[in-house]
Image (spheres, rainbow, N blue to C red):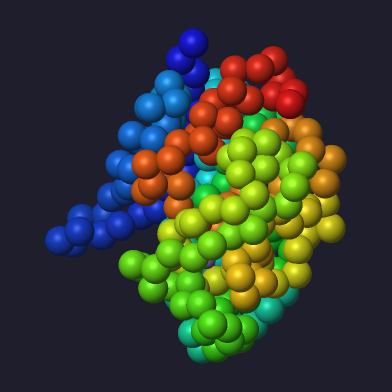
Amino acid sequence: MTRVVAVTAPLRTDAGRERVALNSAYVRALARARLVPLIVPPILDPEEACAALDRVHGLVLTGGEDVSPARYGARPHPKLGETDGARDAVELGLIAAARARRLPILAICRGIQILNVALGGTLYQDLSSERRGAIDHADTRSRHAVRVEPGSLLHRTLATLEASVNSRHHQAIRDLAPSLVATAWAPDGVIEAAEPRDGEPWTLAVQWHPEDDVEGALFRGFAEAVRLPEGVV
Ligand code: MN
């Protein structure tokens, strides 16, 4: 059964024209899992935007700008990248509304960061200056290993305890939100995945970009959860 899911997206300005610009890799990955994306533009009123959730069966939080540090009580670091306060507000509204509706959530890259902040966690604003390690997580060509927590929803979804993932982020989880548990780590200890402590409804957050890999297990797992009544795992 094909189902519709809400998908967040950034704004981009090309040749002076502002656009809502979702990378088509997300669309293709969702389509392969028989999910149709309903794009929720970041310029909507946050409360109005939540009406989209009345018509869908899941929420995907996609990559993009840095989360504004004011959202987790920090002052801007000199290496903080571009932020979009309006997108932060729309996504925080969608996260609260999706949780209230018990919708499955798939959070990717910026998605894991905004989910962690929504639930009371904090972020490294720039890994290379705030948490020096052997891995350059921001090198767009780089891949690194992740170790997966045995028995976690991530483990059950990926069906592996070791994976190689792409890495295109200069921010990451610093303090994990109290209601989340970390379920994957890079070799340098950076948290690469998290999920709710209680496990329900289905929620997976990853720091890498599964939409750019051939491997589609995360999208298939999300699609299975989307097809279940009330997202019960
Ligand atoms: Mn990484």
- Choose top left, top right, bottom left or bottom right for residue 16: bottom left
Res 41 visible: no
Of 219 and 54, the residue lying toward us? 219
Of 105 and 95, the residue lying toward us? 105
Of 161 and 129, the residue lying toward us? 161
- Choose top left, top right, bottom left or bottom right for residue 182: bottom right
Q: Residue furthest left?
A: 15
Res 149 visible: yes
Relative to 129, residue 72 above or below: above
Of 171 and 189, the residue lying toward us? 189
Which residue is found at the position 37% from the left and 41% from the top?
A: 214
Relative to 84, residue 206 above or below: above
Which residue is found at the position 39% from the left and 35% from the top?
A: 29
Please state if 191 lies on the left or on the right of 33 as rendered.
right
- Give the total number of marks visible in the rendering: 0
Relative to 4, residue 11 above or below: below
Please state if 61 lies on the left or on the right of 95 as rendered.
left
Relative to 221, residue 11 above or below: below
Q: Residue furthest top?
A: 1
Which residue is found at the position 34% from the left and 67% from the top?
A: 141
x and y percentages locating residue 82 in the rendered image: 43, 71
In the rendered image, which quarter contains the C terminus? top right
x and y percentages locating residue 12 in the rendered image: 30, 57
x and y percentages locating residue 8 in the rendered image: 47, 44
- Choose top left, top right, bottom left or bottom right for residue 187: bottom right
x and y percentages locating residue 42 in the rendered image: 46, 49
Which residue is found at the position 67% from the left and 30% from the top?
A: 103
